[in-house]
Image (tube, grey):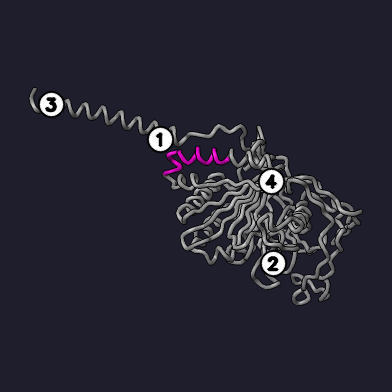
């Protein structure tokens, strides 16, 4: 056989072998990339769930507090210098029908009244009807996905620009904060973003700003003027409130929880936010990994040196199928522990110590499974998953692991892409509104 024929046969054989190898590799990659653990449950977003915590919350109104009235006027309207200090006592509620329903109709047209889903039936112009609560009222159990960020730490972190880009990339900011002049990264020291099901209509914002005592009122006035509105402040549940004329279709209210604390919610969610603040204040801060705090600071409380924390209340409401090995409450927190390192701590709470021990074994098996997937290894998370050690202690399971800056940037970039791709809030299985 001539040399040319031998070379041609060798080339053909080599080509077939290489093709087969490439196909096998491609098949292995696809199989690995798409492999999923055989869970006996699916994740879902409940449409008919309200903001709250797993066990429900007691509510008896916010404590009486005094907020200064800079300059003796409220948005240009002459008032007594103490008019802004007249707040209703704890245990006094608005007589408006705070039904937990949400109407997305734009009610801003031609009025500056605070007219969202629950109206002040039977009230005189410029006043709220109030009636005394007979003791504490109990709000039913709810759920929440709550992200808390220590903006001061973020601003000082090498990852600050990445987190800033992520926050500015969330479309919901544009609809809710646009026109107010509030920059969540530059103006706030703490931020809470919470929702029971990722529907933008039920989004809850709360924060602690770093500016002077007039900052929140000026932001409210600036936003109202951008919509051609005027502002009236009214007391509800012991705090001063005003319409928040956001560009979203859902009417919202801003509440001044202190001179530096505020919340922006649907009007009927204000009492839930106040109740959540009290519920977190009463919890065992040490067991929850939090710094003990009171009042509005409890609403925003995080663990020592934490830059970011994600809490999931009522985890079972996000599950279809078996809830075995699924915690009732989950908390993930991130701390910077070095110039090129962040430590992530997870705390899962179960009903009994036995459930916690079984869950620790189960989730270790899940982590090991995914650590062997090729796409996970290529993303740099294989070794991280293999090193996870799930520890059960009474009703709680804890796990701590470390991430490098590239891994954090990957997670932020992925999350930002998902948010941009979905136009903001993720659509629930049974949507109540169109996104």
- In the picture, which quadrant includes the N terminus? top left
Q: Nearer the viewer, mark 4 or mark 1?
A: 4
How far across and down, in percent of the image, does residue 39 sit?
58, 33
Residue 142, quarter of the rendered image: top right
Foreground: 95 or 248?
95
Q: Residues within 10 Å of mark 3 (few under 14, many from 20)?
A: few
Q: CA distance from mark 4 to mark 1?
A: 39 Å
Confirm whether the magenta stretch covers residue 293. no
Q: Residues within 10 Å of mark 1 (few under 14, many from 20)?
A: some
In magenta, the rendered stretch is 363-377
Residue 229, quarter of the rendered image: bottom right
Foreground: 127 or 106?
127
Foreground: 127 or 291?
291
Label 4: which secondary element: loop
Main SS of the magenta part reads helix
At 62% from the left edge and 38% from the top edge, which residue is drawn?
43
Residue beneath label 3, please? 6
Residue beneath label 2, please? 216
Residue beneath label 1, please? 29
Say which label, 1 or 2, has the lower sequence index. 1
Q: CA distance from mark 1 to mark 2?
A: 53 Å
- Mark drawn on residue 395: 4
Q: Is residue 23 visible?
A: yes
Left/right placement of residue 242 relative to residue 289 reads: right
Q: CA distance from mark 4 to mark 2?
A: 41 Å
């Amino acid at each position: 056989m001539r040399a040319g024929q031998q070379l041609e046969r060798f080339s053909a054989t080599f080509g077939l072998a290489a093709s087969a190898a490439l196909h096998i590799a491609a098949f292995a990659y696809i199989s690995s990339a798409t492999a999923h653990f055989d869970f006996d449950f699916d994740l879902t977003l409940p449409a008919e769930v309200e903001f709250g915590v797993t066990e429900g919350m007691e509510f008896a109104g916010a404590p009486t507090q005094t907020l200064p009235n800079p300059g003796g006027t409220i948005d240009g309207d002459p008032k007594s210098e103490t008019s802004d200090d007249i707040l209703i006592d704890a245990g006094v509620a608005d007589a408006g029908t705070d039904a937990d329903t949400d109407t997305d109709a734009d009610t801003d047209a031609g009025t500056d009244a605070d007219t969202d889903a629950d109206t002040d039936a039977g009230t005189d112009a410029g006043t709220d009807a109030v009636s005394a609560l007979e003791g504490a009222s109990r709000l039913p159990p709810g759920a929440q996905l709550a992200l808390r960020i220590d903006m001061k730490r973020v601003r000082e972190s090498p990852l600050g620009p990445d987190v800033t880009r992520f926050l500015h990339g969330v479309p919901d900011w544009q609809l809710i904060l646009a026109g107010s002049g509030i920059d969540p990264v530059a103006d706030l020291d703490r931020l809470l973003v919470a929702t029971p099901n990722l529907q933008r209509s039920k989004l809850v914002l709360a924060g602690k700003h770093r500016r002077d005592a007039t900052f929140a009122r000026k932001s409210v006035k600036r936003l109202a003027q951008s919509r051609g509105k005027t502002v009236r402040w009214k007391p509800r549940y012991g705090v001063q409130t005003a319409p928040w004329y956001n560009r979203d279709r859902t009417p919202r209210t801003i509440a001044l929880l202190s001179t530096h604390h505020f919340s922006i919610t649907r009007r009927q969610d204000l009492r839930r936010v106040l109740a959540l603040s009290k519920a977190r204040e009463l919890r065992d801060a040490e067991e929850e990994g939090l710094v003990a705090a009171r009042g509005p600071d409890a609403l925003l409380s995080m663990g020592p040196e934490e830059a970011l924390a994600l809490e999931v209340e009522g985890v079972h409401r996000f599950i279809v199928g078996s809830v075995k090995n699924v915690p009732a409450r989950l908390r993930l927190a991130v701390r910077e522990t070095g110039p090129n390192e962040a430590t992530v701590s997870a705390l899962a709470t179960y009903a009994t110590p036995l459930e916690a021990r079984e869950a620790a074994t189960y989730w270790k098996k899940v982590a090991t499974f995914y650590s062997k997937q090729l796409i996970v290894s290529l993303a740099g998370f294989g070794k991280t998953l293999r090193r996870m050690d799930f520890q059960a202690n009474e009703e709680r399971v804890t796990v701590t692991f470390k991430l490098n800056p590239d891994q954090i940037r990957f997670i932020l970039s992925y999350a930002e892409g998902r948010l941009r791709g979905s136009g903001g809030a993720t659509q629930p299985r049974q949507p109540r509104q169109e996104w």
